[in-house]
Image (cartoon, rainbow, N blue to C red):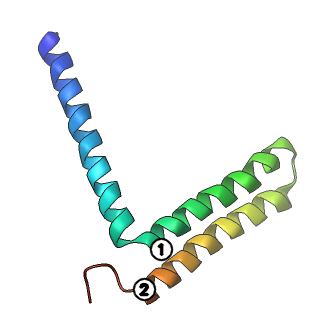
Amino acid sequence: MRKTLAWIKSTAQLVALNAVAWLRTVLVTEPARVRAAVMSGVVALAVFVPAFANENIAGQVTGVVLFVLQLALGEQTRARVTPVGKE
């Protein structure tokens, strides 16, 4: 039982370290994509949370459109920006 728990703990630590390393790499090499994802998340929360309070379908559709629009604009901006290290 102890070996299993130790293996689970070491695996969780390894996954967490790899996730942090990946996040750092993405933040450095793809800032436009990260900015678009953060803005999409903020817009989604700002629209979806109030939309769940009532049964207004238009609010939910608007939230989906704004979410997709932010991602599309972020990808368009990212395509125009040269990634760091690729000059």
In the picture of the structure, the residue carrying the numbered disc 1 is 32
Give how far across and how far down residue 38 sits, in percent.
Answer: 55, 60
Of the residues shown, which amino acid type is indicated by label 1? Ala
In the picture of the structure, the residue carrying the numbered disc 2 is 81
Give how far across and how far down residue 86 sits, in percent.
Answer: 26, 85
Tell me if residue 31 comes above or below residue 76 in the rendering: above
Q: For the residue labelled by badge 1, is the local secondary structure a helix, a strand or a loop? A: helix
Of the residues shown, which amino acid type is indicated by label 2? Val
User: Dot 2: within a 10 Å radius of its alpha carbon, few (fewer than 14), some, or many (20 or more) residues?
Assistant: few
Residue at x-position 58% and y-position 79%: 73
Give how far across and how far down residue 67 sits, in percent.
Answer: 64, 65
Furthest residue toward top: 1
* Cβ atoms at labels 1 and 2 below 8 Å apart: yes
Q: For the residue labelled by badge 2, is the local secondary structure a helix, a strand or a loop? A: loop
With 46 as the anchor, is 16 left or right in this view? left
Q: Which quadrant holds the C terminus?
A: bottom left
Residue at x-position 56% and y-position 77%: 72
Tell me if residue 74 comes above or below residue 24 in the rendering: below
Q: Which quadrant holds the N terminus?
A: top left
Residue at x-position 31% and y-position 48%: 20
The answer to which image quadrant residue 59 occupies is bottom right
Tell me if residue 44 comes above or below residue 7 in the rendering: below
Task: From the viewer's side, name the closer residue of 21 and 5.
Answer: 21
Tell me if residue 51 comes above or below residue 7 in the rendering: below
Q: Earlier in the sequence, mark 1 or mark 2?
A: 1
Give how far across and how far down residue 50 sits, in percent.
Answer: 81, 48
User: Dot 1: within a 10 Å radius of its alpha carbon, few (fewer than 14), some, or many (20 or more) residues?
Assistant: many
